[in-house]
Image (tube, rainbow, N blue to C red):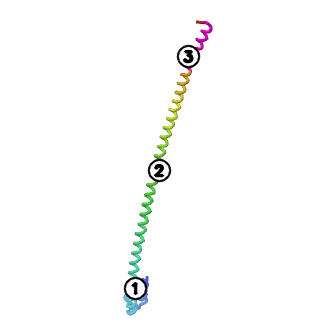
Amino acid sequence: MEILRLIEEIEDVIENGSTLPFSNKVMVDMDEIYNILGEIRIKLPDEIKQASWVKEERQRILAEAQKDADTILNEAELRLEELIDQDEVTRKAKEMAEEMMIKAKQNAKDIRLGALEYADNILLETQEKLKEHINILNKNRHELRGDQ
């Protein structure tokens, strides 16, 4: 910054000034000090404007960074909710699939038992019919032989 350089010049003028014996007082060229102070007065508004602009720009950048951070955080939260929902959907789908498998196995077992029972009933009916036919055949054979 230009003002800092000018302040350093004032310090140099003071350090290089003549000291009064037995005191801390220094003799300096008053015109040189006034010239430097005049330059400071000229530069000061520009420096203040620049510092003010830097401060405003800093605030704008910080606000923008905060906005970006909030956006990223919101997007992350939404994505997390989506993943949780997907996980929930997947869990429910697995539960439904397991229930369907259990029902399908039970239905298959019921159908198999029903089919066995039906086949057993058909075989029993056939066996009973065959017994009737065998009895009729035996009876007819006895009649043919004349056995009564």
Q: Earlier in the sequence, mark 3 or mark 1?
A: 1
Provide residue 143's location: percent of width, then percent of height. Answer: 60, 9
Q: Which mark is residue 87?
A: 2
Provide residue 101's location: percent of width, then percent of height. Answer: 50, 40
Is 61 placed above or below 43 here? above
Query: Helix or strand or loop: what does disc 2 sit on?
Result: helix
What's the residue type where badge 3 is placed? Glu
The residue labelled by disc 1 is 43
Q: Earlier in the sequence, mark 1 or mark 2?
A: 1
Provide residue 65's location: percent of width, then percent of height. Answer: 43, 68
Q: Which residue lies at the image location 41% right of the left edge and 66% below the top edge?
A: 67
Question: Total of numbered circles in the picture?
Answer: 3
The residue labelled by disc 3 is 132
- Within 10 Å of disc 3 (Cα), the crowding (few <14, some 14-19, many 20+) is few
Q: Is residue 20 visible?
A: no
Q: Indicate the quadrant where residue 82 lies.
A: bottom left
Query: Magenta: predominant secondary structure element?
Result: helix
What's the residue type where badge 2 is placed? Asp
- Residue 122 drawn in magenta: no
